[in-house]
Image (tube, helix red, strand yellow):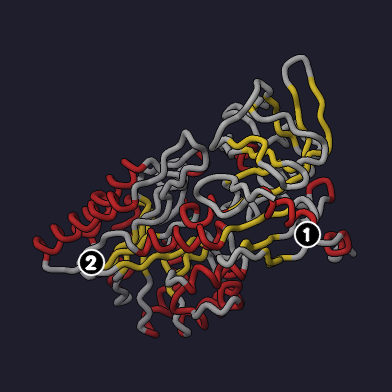
Amino acid sequence: MENTRLNEFSKLSSDLAARAVKEFGSPIYIYDESLILKRCQECLDMPHAYGLTVRYAMKANPNRTLLKIITGAGLHLDASSLNEVLRAHMAGVPYEKIMLTTQEAYEGEDMALLEKLLLDGLKYNVCSLRQLYLIGDFACKNYIEPGIRIHPGVGSGESATRNTGDDYSCFGIHLSDLDEALKYAWGKWIKFKHVHVHIGSGADSEMWRQNIDLELGIIEKHFKETDSVCFGGGLKEARMPSEQSADIEHLGSYAKKQINAFYKKHKRKLKMEIEPGTYIAANSGYAVTMVIDKKCTARANFIVTDGGMELNSRPLLYGSKHPVYIVAADGSCVKSSEFGDIPGDYSAVVAGKCCESGDCQTLDMDGHATPRKMAEPDIGDIAIIGGTGAYCSSMAPFNYNSHTQAPEVLLTKNGDLRLIRKRQTLEQVLENEI
Ligand SMILES: *Cc1c(COP(=O)(O)O)cnc(C)c1O
């Protein structure tokens, strides 16, 4: 059998995809370990001046096996909830390698847990005045030095809902509250050694670069004791052939230059951190589905697959575009790939099986189903949605219509297919109902 790769950047081939469906059923997610490792290395190789820590934003995809692969490659973790911290620890990641940056504000048992974890080495960014006041006495008494997430008032994201830095969102302590935070911290002998900004997901690279200057300016003005700066995540990874990924080398070189200039002026060597989620995981993932029906309307052809918004809700949430691959049922060939030639003039909307007109992988920004050029599939062919390694399995409404959560399969760097999460059963969907 001819071994046909889906695209140039991944080891996934049509015969491997067909084999996975035969072995584990459909729909499934497949993750390409080699590509994850490559992206980890690219981030670790980012130019820097006085040290670099790369934290994988685990909310992108917190599967235990992926956490092991990624931390095994030398990355630390960014967690967005206490449960994520516990989950990472259960995957074997020591607390010292985890930074918690969260919207949660803890009291009672949760606060007691946070305090215990801080004593065990967990790192914590305060993200609001309230969070600061809640941890203040404990931090003071136990010599804990929390970091601080600043809300700079400007941000960037692929859509309005993923901009975390502008004044339409509330992540971090806004510049207008900074004096209050600093005054309180001063009174409690709390030093902010670490300053953090995350401007958004899928950020414009130029905005990401500008944030370097903005953040260094904030440190210069307000934080005399800071020795570590985090520029956040949001490094763009191109999912579609028409999109452009962030230039890590270029952004790193710029950060290095500016951190060096900061040293010349202030004689302080700032360590640097970044928190990529999307960049590490997005293109490693594939949602592998089967074509179960074909229909048409006066407007367009539709193919119906056995996995849609309950595997990947990004098109519905954001109007995000994901590449579509059509693979022969027996895996003998890739019939069409958006990274290669698309023969003929057939085009179709890719719909899922949920009772929801938005259950569609090819929506435009206004939520309209939009046909894509592709090879006309036969029923039983495999339709693969690319770019689904980040914010798909972790974020999809998987039990809608009582569908069960899809399994996850790892394509190992040795070329083996390994089940890393089983398919959910209907009993598991119902087990908490009383
Ligand atoms: C979500 C998040 C990230 C990762 O964003 P990506 O766009 O996936 O790189 C990084 N840092 C924080 C604080 C986040 O909330």
The residue sitting at 61% across, 58% down in the picture is: 31
In percent of width and height, residue 395 lies at: 64, 52
Nearer the observer, 79 or 284: 284
Residue density around tag 2, few if under 14, some if 14–19, many if 20 or more, within 10 Å: many
Whether residue 349 is visible here, answered yes or no, is yes
Q: Quadrant of the C terminus?
A: bottom right
Q: Secondary structure at mark 2?
A: loop
- Which residue is nearer to you in this view: 161 or 186? 161
Which of 49/141 is in front? 49
Q: Is residue 226 left or right of residue 312?
A: left
Is 24 displayed left or right of 370 in the figure?
right
Q: Which residue is mark 2?
A: 270
Q: Position of residue 169 (x, y in %)?
A: 47, 45
Q: Which residue is mark 1?
A: 24
Instruction: Answer above or below: position of 215 versus 302.
Output: below
User: Mark 1 near mark 2, Cβ–Cβ under 8 Å?
Assistant: no
- Residue 259, by quadrant, is bottom left
Q: Amino acid at mark 2?
A: Leu
Residue occupying the far left of the picture:
264
Q: Is residue 278 left or right of residue 304?
A: left
Q: Position of residue 422 (x, y in %)?
A: 76, 65
**Alpha carbon separation for disc pair 1 and 2:** 48 Å
Tell me: residue 86, above or below residue 26: below
- Looking at this rendering, what residue extends furthest in the front direction? 1
Q: Residue at x 83, y 46 (%)?
A: 401
Left/right of residue 405 with respect to residue 56 in the rendered view:
right
**Where residue 115 appears, x then y in whole percent?**
50, 80
Q: Earlier in the sequence, mark 1 or mark 2?
A: 1
> Most extreme residue toward the top, as rendered?
298
